[in-house]
Each structure stands twice: as structure tokens, then as C-alpha cells.
Amino acid sequence: NELVSYCHTAFVSLSAVEVSVRTLQDHWRQGLASLVTAAFIDHCQKIGKRPNWECWWDNQPSIALGGRMGFAGMEDYPVYYWEE
């Protein structure tokens, strides 16, 4: 009765949604991230939105999961952000 893995979006445009995945560490390496991400991508396609996968260059687990989900790597580009 515990939520241990989920996939959602924090960024939406008219045509695309950003994919965000979280799994509690005690449940890593069980395929849960792949299951929730596949369901999320399927839902995106059903509603006519293109899922978009991005992560930091050193986030190897995310890069691997994105690859398993069919996303291709792309070249790095500058990102600017601020914290308050």
C-alpha cells in the first residue's frame, strides 16, 4: 500500500510533455521505472502529446532508462537556472 515508483510531467507545451520518473531507492533495479515510464509514454501518445526525455549528462541511470524507452541521446547544450 505504498507508492514506490511514479512517472509524471512538470513541463507541458501544446505538443509535448517532459518525462519525470521517481522510484524509491529500496525498490531500484526491479523494472518499476520502466513499467511506469512505458505507461506514461503510452498515455502521452493516446492524448496526442510527444514525450520528451532530458536529464543531466552525468545521470547514467536516467540515460539508460531513456535509451530503453526508445529515446536517443543528443548533444549537450547550455542550461541556465537559478535557485532562490
Image: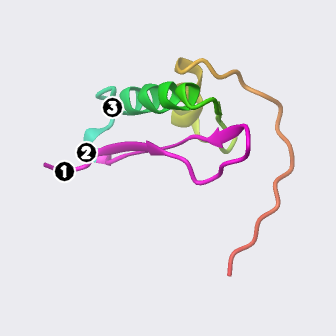
Amino acid carrying label 3: it is: Leu
Q: Is residue 13 left or right of residue 35?
A: right
Q: Which residue is mark 3?
A: 32
Q: Is residue 22 magenta?
A: yes
Q: Which residue is mark 2?
A: 26
Q: Position of residue 34 (x, y in %)?
A: 41, 27
Picture quarter with the C terminus: bottom right
Tell me which residue sits at (52%, 28%) in the image.
41
Tell me which residue sits at (59%, 21%) in the image.
67
68 or 8: nearer the eye? 8
10 in relation to 71, above or below: below
66 or 45: nearer the eye? 45
Q: Is residue 14 left or right of residue 5?
A: right
Q: Is residue 15 magenta?
A: yes
Mark closest to the chain's N terminus, 3 or 1: 1
Q: Which of labels 1 and 2 is toward the front?
A: 1
Which residue is the extreme one toward the front? 47
Amino acid carrying label 2: it is: Asp
Give the structural element (helix, strand or loop) at label 3: helix
| Residue 58 is at least partly visible in this image | no
Q: Quadrant of residue 81?
A: bottom right
Amino acid carrying label 1: it is: Glu
**Neighbour class for label 1 at 10 Å: few (<14), some, many (≥20)?**
few
Q: Position of residue 38 (x, y in %)?
A: 45, 25
Q: Which residue is mark 1?
A: 2
| Residue 48 is at least partly visible in this image | yes
Which residue is the extreme one toward the right? 78
Question: Magenta region: which residues?
Answer: 1-25
Q: Quadrant of residue 66?
A: top right
